[in-house]
Amino acid sequence: MRLRLTEEEAAFREEMRAFFTTEIPQDIRDDVRAGRHLDKDAFVRSMRVMNEAGLAVPNWPVEWGGKDWTPLQKHLWHEEMQLACVPPPLAFNASMIGPVIAHFGSEEMKQRFLPATANLDIWWCQGFSEPNAGSDLASLTTRAERSGDDWVVNGQKTWTTLGQHADWIFCLARTDPDVKKQAGISMLLFPMDSPGVTLRPIKMIDGGYEVNEVFFDNVVVPGENLVGEVNQGWTQAKFLLGNERVGVAPVGATKRALATAKEHAIGLGALTDPLMAARFVELENELLALELTALRVVANSADGKPHPASSVLKLKGTELQQAVTELSVDLAGPLSIASGSQTVPEWAAHSVPTYLNFRKASIYGGSNEIQRQIIAGTILGL
Amino acid sequence: MDFELDDEQVALRDAVRGLVKVYDPAVDSERRREVTASDPGYDEALWGRLAEMGLLGLPFPEEDGGMGAGPVEVALVAEELGRVLAPEPYVAAVVLAGGLVAELGSPEQRKEILGALSAGERLLTFASGEVAEPVIQGARADTVVWEVGGEVFLVDRPAEVTAYRTHDGGRAALMEFDRAAAVPLGDGGDASETVATVLARAQIAACHEALGAMDTALRMTTAYLKTRKQFGVTLNTFQALTFRAADMYTDLELTRSIVTWATLVAADTDSAADPTLIRDAGARAKLQTAHAGRRIGQEAIQLHGGIGVTDEYAVGHYTSRLTALSHWLGESREQISVLSAGLTRHGVLDPLD
């Protein structure tokens, strides 16, 4: 047992900290710190700086720009990025479709897409959820039918995050309706400006636009744009979702948000209230326990298999992320109502929209109920 | 950072587990009840075997009759005792009272007292204040390490002691002390800093004891959900129940992380130079353990149903013991108060710095 990082690990951490705090444009980091919505350009600029330095897609195979890092190094990379208020590399590219193409795609497909995906020259969106296929994703009904060498796609996706910025979509579609539902799904790639694709933004409770509905009306997709084999889509989706959950415990970002809330509390003199101080103490302690659990998971997943406690990270991580947004609302007090005001402090005006926005965290990436199901079934054998 | 045990530590854990498995409800559902039914409420023969294994002298230097081991080894012992609710007063006698003698005692005191403690010949306990209550095993202890106003003394057990059974099957006492009969530990004088550090080490060990108990409470609960039938099906058919078990697991794993970290802080050489690090870690571990112990204890009973509140079945004993551990050596309110005072000393809290 050992408390400290090794010298090499500490040096690596220092290197990451220096990079993220000096190389990523300050205006982007300021926007993240203040909790403002980022525009497309901010994501693109930030990810290109990282890609230039070879730090955008460390989880990919080395030949496609990945890093031969230990799980702990990947953890430190991710934590330092969040602590520095750097927007993470676009998840749809870096964590989702990139690894899928690298693992399942043909050599041609890799050459065509991976470099552009790492550099955010292509902005991907995720065509998975449908109105009647959320947590039960395998029930999806969007279909792709053969037409010569092409596929013709009809149906509808929803909750397509940042689809309004997307150049391409990776889309699950039913390619065989006559087999067990998981066995008849394939993954197709096509441009969002293909004829027959319609995007409808969904306004969210915080007033912003993050997600969309996407409709497909006889969208023609060339056969070469099918990832891997026909009807392999469910395997690919599970592979993708497994990667999605790894980075989903937002420890560093939540620590940063809590530290920022503490600065506001100090400014307001609110920490002299023992009840308010106690809430900070409790949250800091729970976050510490979460971070240490994350470290246990990365320290023990060197053989490639995730530690059984990793579902705990998503479940507790999102609960704490939400609890910090709640704390900010309570700290703002009545000023939290003044979300349209130009005179109250920006953080106070933003507090409720942020709080409302982050209700999503316990729903996406496998809802927290799904995580409880995994813990009860896979870990406890219930 | 590394949370894995080495081979020697695994061997130690397994040896302790073997020694105390007589208390495991799955091995002998009556043994603990028998032992706790009559004074002194623990098995003195087993205490002797703990001494033979070197466990009672585990954290003390070899020249004082100990084994020269560290907080990780102590934690392993405490966790195994907690796993089966062994009633032996290990943390109170060895980690807390013995720990103070090791830190403050003169060479002669250390040799005499720690030697006898390690050999299982003399039971130590700790008491604080002119009138102290509840003193763990106060009526049985041969020697009391007594703290009053920051000064620490050695006192023989007074002739008059009001002793009683505690709700978790243990023994405690109300004790009044007379300064005239007290011998200063070491040079005497204010030792409040050292007392705080040793208390933190004892807190961390007690958290490991609680961790072991929580682990068993969860195991018993999941086993029960898989076997108990109602409406013609086993209880694990009901999601309302399995989700609550999942939350117990989440509590347990988060607690395991922070308590293990606290032990690593206590074992770290930098912490020896700055003991506030150990006290802070003790407060953090204790706060999390108190919350988790309460939730897991309550849920373990609830998911068992009526049998959980009977004395005949073990799970309620776990809840009782977890409750005692939560309130011993500083409850959550005190930890919040300690940690509140330090809130502005850091921006983000960083366990790797």
Image (tube, rainbow, N blue to C red):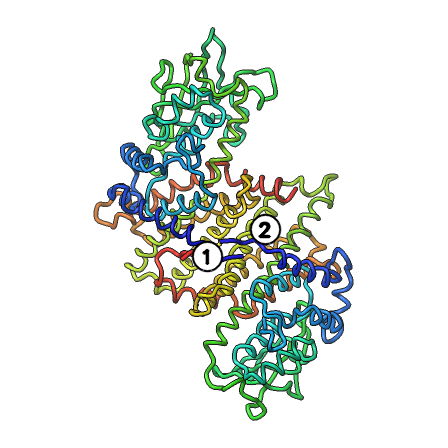
Characterize the local packing of mark 2: few (<14), some (14-19) or many (20 or more) Cα atoms within 10 angstroms: many
Of residues B235 and A110, the one nearer the viewer is: A110
Residue B221 percent across, percent down from the top left = 67, 50
Residue depicted at 50% across the width and 20% down the height: A228
Residue A169 percent across, percent down from the top left = 40, 23
The answer to whether residue A343 is above or below residue B42 is above
Which element type, helix, strand or loop, lies under badge 1?
loop
Quarter of the figure with residue B12: bottom right
The answer to whether residue A297 is above or below residue A108 is below
Which element type, helix, strand or loop, lies under badge 2?
helix
Characterize the local packing of mark 1: few (<14), some (14-19) or many (20 or more) Cα atoms within 10 angstroms: some
Of residues A303 and B328, the one nearer the viewer is: A303
Residue A148 percent across, percent down from the top left = 47, 6
Residue B293 appears in view: yes
Tag 2 subunit: B
Q: Which residue is denoted by mark 2 in the rendering?
A: B248
| Side of B40 relative to A379 (left or right) | right
Q: Which residue is denoted by mark 1 in the rendering?
A: A4
The amino acid type, in three-letter code, at marker 1 is Arg
Q: Quadrant of the C terminus of chain B?
A: bottom left
C-alpha span from label 1 to label 2: 29 Å
Which of pointers 1 and 2 indicates the residue nearer the eye?
1
